Amino acid sequence: MRADASITDLAERFHMTLTGMRKHIGILEQAELVATEKVGRVRTCRLGSRRLEEELAWIENYRQMWAARFDALDTVIEELKRKEKRDGRKQRK
């Protein structure tokens, strides 16, 4: 993300074959997340015109939903712990 990179550089960095990286880049290019340019024998990749705003909004929506559900679950668990502690004391007496 910091700078343009060749497919060869990306394949090395992610420990992939050139063929595997080309396939991945091809899919990202179709989604307009990556753009490539061939200069001589080197194909360079850069971030494409389409950013991930839609995906980030979708993820954030679900993150908020799950955070609220986990908060509610924490409340229920704490309530059950208090009740168990209180009921446990009553049974000992």
Image (cartoon, rainbow, N blue to C red):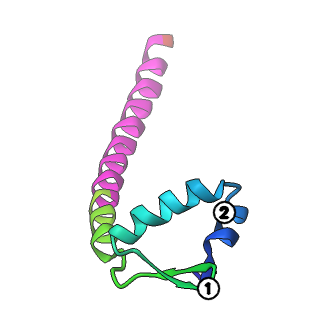
Q: Is residue 24 above or below residue 35?
A: above
Q: Could you say which is closer to the camera, residue 31 or residue 88?
A: 31
Relative side of 43 to 16, left or right:
left
Residue range corresponding to the magenta coloring:
63-91
Callout 1 environment at 10 Å: few (<14), some (14 to 19), or many (20+)? few
Numbered circles on residues, count = 2
Which amino acid type is shown beneath numbered disc 1? Gly
Which amino acid type is shown beneath numbered disc 2? Ala
For image coordinates 44% across by 31% down, the residue present is: 81
- The N terminus, quarter of image: bottom right
Residue 33 in the magenta stretch? The answer is no
Q: Position of residue 10 (x, y in %)?
A: 65, 68
Distance between the alpha carbons at the discs numbered 1 and 2: 19 Å
The image quadrant that residue 80 belongs to is top left
Read off the residue under disc 1: 40
For image coordinates 66% across by 54% down, the residue present is: 16
Q: Is residue 4 above or below residue 9?
A: below
Q: Position of residue 57 (x, y in %)?
A: 28, 70
Residue contact at pointers 1 and 2, CB within 8 angstroms:
no
- Between tags 1 and 2, which lies in front? 1
